Amino acid sequence: MVKLEERTGDPDQDLANAIIIQAARDYRAALRGMRNYRGDKGRQSKRYWNYEKTISDCERFFTGEVFEILSDLDGNWLMKKLKNEK
């Protein structure tokens, strides 16, 4: 499991870490939801669409400029690690 320090003593870094941690939690939850989803997978299914949207939004965040500003982590590496969690 990927672990970031939630408290560093630096308020700016703590905020950056909190943003990344929440995005990772959202991404992990959406990935698990997609894996476990048993309903209709068509576009009309709101729950399935929400999982897809969250995954897409998180992937855009992890590979975007804001993530690079907030962290020294490689966003693609982080996504790979989160996807491989069981």
Image (tube, rainbow, N blue to C red):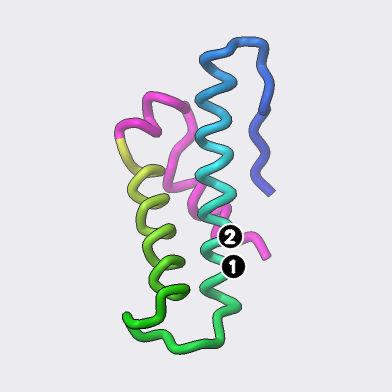
> Which secondary structure is most common in the magenta stretch?
helix
Where is mark 2, residue-wise? 29
Q: State left or right for residue 47 relative to residue 28.
A: left
Q: What's the residue at 40%, 81% (across, down)?
A: 45
Give above or below for 61 relative to 55: above
Q: State left or right for residue 60 relative to residue 40.
A: left
Where is mark 1, residue-wise? 32
Q: What's the residue at 50%, 44% (across, down)?
A: 23
Q: Check disc 1 and give the amino acid type.
A: Arg
Q: Are marks 1 and 2 in contact (CB under 8 Å)?
A: yes
Q: What's the residue at 44%, 26% (across, down)?
A: 70
Give above or below for 10 relative to 52: above
x, y (%) of residue 14? 59, 21
Q: Check disc 2 and give the amino acid type.
A: Ala
x, y (%) of residue 44? 34, 82
Total numbered labels? 2
Please report the bounds of the magenta region as a residue range.
65-86
